Each structure stands twice: as C-alpha cells, then as structure tokens.
Image (cartoon, rainbow, N blue to C red):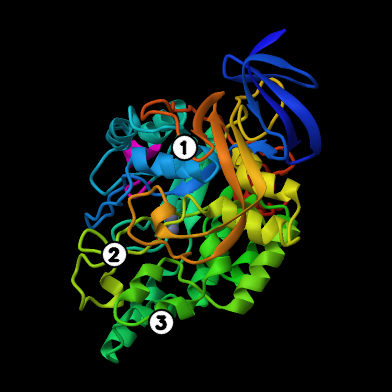
Amino acid sequence: MMFDLVISGGTVATAADTFRADIGITDGRIAALGEGLEGADSIDAGGRLVLPGGIEAHCHIAQESATGGMTSDDYRSGSISAAFGGNSCFIPFAAQHRGKGVTETLDLYDSRAMGASVIDWSYHLIVADPTETVLRDELPAAFARGITSFKVFMTYDLMRVDDAQFLDILTVAKTHGALTMVHAENSGMIAWMTRRLLEAGHTAPRYHAPSHPALAESEAINRAISLARLVDAPLLIVHVSTPEGAGLVHDARLAGAKIFGETCPQYLFLTRDDLDRPGMEGAKFMCSPPLRDTATQEALWRHIQGGTFSLWSSDHSPYRFDDTGKLAKGTDAHFGQIANGMPGIGLRLPLLFSEGVNKGRITLQQFVALSASNAARLYGLPQKGSIAIGMDADIAIWNPQETRTVTVKDQHDNMDYTPFEGRKLTGWPTTVLTRGRRVVEDGRLIATPGDGRFVARERIDLTGHPGATVPELDPATNFGVKVAP
Ligand code: DUC
Ligand code: ZN
Ligand code: ZN
C-alpha cells in the first residue's frame, strides 16, 4: 500500500507508550503504524522523537482588552510562532466585552483567524456579560458552533462576573457538556492592596507582586471550586501560580469534584525577582497572577509530577515593550496601569522538554500528556492529541539532543522581548505537521497563512469523573430538608 506520506525511522511516543514505528499518512490522517511503510512522499525521522503535535490551549491572539489594548500577535504571527514551538493546533480566546453579544464576538474572531492561521484552531469564549439572552440563547448557540469551553474572570472590573453569574454560566455549560475555565483571583483584595501600595508611593513594576497576594488566588480558587461543586459542574482553574492554589485543586480532585488545573512556564522558570529590574524593565515580567518565588517553583514541579495539573499552557499575552503595549501609559505609569501578560507561545514545549524530560523530572509520557493529549480530551478534540490510526496526522518531530540558547531574534512572534532570553535549552521541535501537511520543516516555514482550519469541538470527556450533587440542590432529597412523616 502506498501512503501519501511516510514518516520513517523515528521513535514514536504517546501519552501511553514509546515505540519504534513508521507512520503512514493518507488524506491528512494516520493510516498505518508499521515497519518498512512506503509513501509518495517521506520524512526521515531517524534519531528523532515523533510526538503528537502540541495543542496550545491558553494564548491571547488578536485580542483586545476591555480597556482597548490589542495583543501584538495576530492569527498569522501567533500560529507561526506556535508551530515553530512544536504546536499543530491552538485555542486562543474570543473575548466578549460588556454590551456585545456572543455571536457577534465569535464572528469577529472568525474574521481575524480565517485566512491567517497556519495551524488548526478553535476559541475559548470569554463571557463578560452573561445577560439572559446570552445564557438562554447565545451560549447554547456557541456550543452548537463547536465552542465548548467558556472562560470567566473573578477579577478585572470590566470583565468579572459575580458568584451568582458564575453559577449561571457553570450551569449552562454543564447542561451542554462545555467546560468552564476561570481566572481565580479575589478582586477586592487586589484593589485594596493596590490602593495601599500607591498611597505609600510604591508605583514601580515590582509592586505588582504584592498587589496580587497568594491569598487572593487561594481564596478565589476555593470559592470557584465551591461554586462548581454546588452545581456539580466541571471547572478548570487556569494559570495556577501558588502551592496553596494547587493544593486546593488536588484536594478537590481527591474529593471527587470535576476540577482541573493548569499552570504555565512563567511560574516554574521565573520569580518575582525578575520584576525587580531597573526602570520599567520589570514591566516585561508582569503577568497575573504574578510571578512568585523559588519555593513555589519547586512545589509546582511536584504538583506536575503528581498529576494535579492536566494542562501546561503558555498564557502567551504579547504586549510589546513600547507604546503599543507595556508602555502605552508612558514610562511613569504605575504598576496598576501596565498591561498584564508575557509572551512564550514558542517556548512552552522546549522549556518543559529541557527542564522536565531531559532533567528527569517528568517522563516522555507525561510530557506528551501535558503538551497535547490532556488538552484534546478536556477541550473536545478527540481526533487530535495522540498518534493512532484514524487520528489527524498532527505531528511534531523533535531533536532531543539539540541545544539552543533562547533569544528574541529566534522567536517568530511579533514581540520585541522574550522573558526567557539567554536560557540554554536542550530538545527542540524541528518539523511540525497539521493534518499531514508540513507547517514547519527543519526550521523553515512551509505553510501559508490560511492553511489552518477551524475545528468544531465536542463536549468535554468526563469519563472517570463521577457526579456528586450537593443535597441542597437535589429535588430528589427535597433539597436536603427532612419532612416529618
Ligand atoms: N489572565 C490571563 O489569562 N492572561 C493574561 C492576563 C490575565 O490576567
Ligand atoms: Zn487570566
Ligand atoms: Zn491568559
């Protein structure tokens, strides 16, 4: 049998196994795994690892903030830099702003992504204005359109939902099989700390860290988990940055709640000391939640090893170090006026491979799970995230021995800095395919903008997560109220 393309001689790894095999690809799908396969076209993967293409499941692309700032990456540059970082699919956000509908928001993002992305994509929908129409009509319509994850904010005055609105969204999401995601930080604590710091004259970027205390995260995570448990809805806590927060995710999972956790490279590779650079340089390291300390890094590695985190995402939020981004409010701006976020879409996987797999902290199987397989399962992409017959031929070929020093010049995003500058990493993706099509080959861009496709996603796969409605919500137990016989 002649395949369209054969990847030969590589070592294939999935979230379950590592084995030697050729991969036969026809019509964009994996058609065979075997030995001595023949194809009309071929890629020699001798001495390389052949992995499922990464799924970057948390990144901000062509997204305007509620205050009007625009990320510096669009779907062309964002998808290209994702591909150079070993990703064959990504899921940025489509952000609803107050007063706007969900359908018009999704239409807007379609116009930004179509014809621009070099890899397959979907969106998570940020819900900032959960009106009756949104809850009744527009969220179900978004779900029917294949947008099966909704994100809410517990902080940011122009974005946040209150607890009752959060419950409404969790309930609609649960009814349809969608996954709710949450940015969990206590808004009042942040506002209060910010005011106190500014009153004391502390305006420099370094004060961003104390303005977002660890307790603000753990309080909000605890509340978010409680809300999800009340209605027995699945909930993903994004960008967990503290051991306390990770502990809450871990405990909730043990208690049988459908809670999932995500962390990001910045919390394991950088610390709040990075905010302490001269002048405004620290602004490059401002993200929310903020960077913490080295003890946190170690604790978060243990939570990765122990399985607390299902997702490892870049939270790529590209704001340049100029007046289009970090310096939009001038060089005298106080920390509360500076855009939150940092870039890293092209380095998410090399960082984890080098420091995780190569240093023996995690197995190759854990790497594959964190880079692709778990995201595929949680976000309804059953055709992606593994290497098996019938699946999309979304594949990343890695050279596990190659060492490079990270520099902004080698990034493919629209940024003018990388927070990981100067870091020496071993293990890099060299070739990436989406649906059997070369996107990047041996470090060269092959695909053209528009080659990527929108992927309509399915409901979250909750196999292995039993339900547990609380008595107070269960009509079958008379809402937990005993009635005299
Ligand atoms: N939250 C994110 O998820 N990304 C960037 C900034 C933020 O607050
Ligand atoms: Zn967030
Ligand atoms: Zn984010």
* Discs 2/1, front: 1
x and y percent of residue 275 in the render?
41, 77
Q: Residue shown at 20%/78% (left/top)?
A: 332
Q: Secondary structure at mark 3?
A: helix
Q: Which residues are magenta?
A: 127-135
Query: Disc 3 designates what residue?
Result: 276
Dot 2 amino acid type: Phe
Q: Is residue 335 magenta?
A: no
Which mark is first along the chain, 2 or 3? Answer: 3
Seen from the viewer's position, the closer of residues 215 and 306 is 306
| Dot label at residue 321 | 2
Residue 118 visible in the picture: yes
Tell which residue pokes out farthest to the top in this image: 1
Seen from the viewer's position, the closer of residues 268 and 199 is 268
Which mark is first along the chain, 1 or 3? Answer: 3
x and y percent of residue 392 in the render?
60, 24
- Gap between marks 3 and 2, in whole Å? 16 Å
Dot 3 amino acid type: Asp
Seen from the viewer's position, the closer of residues 311 and 101 is 311
Q: Quadrant of residue 94?
A: top left
Q: Secondary structure at mark 1?
A: strand
Disc 2 crowd, CA 10 A, few/some/many (<14, 14-19, 20+): some
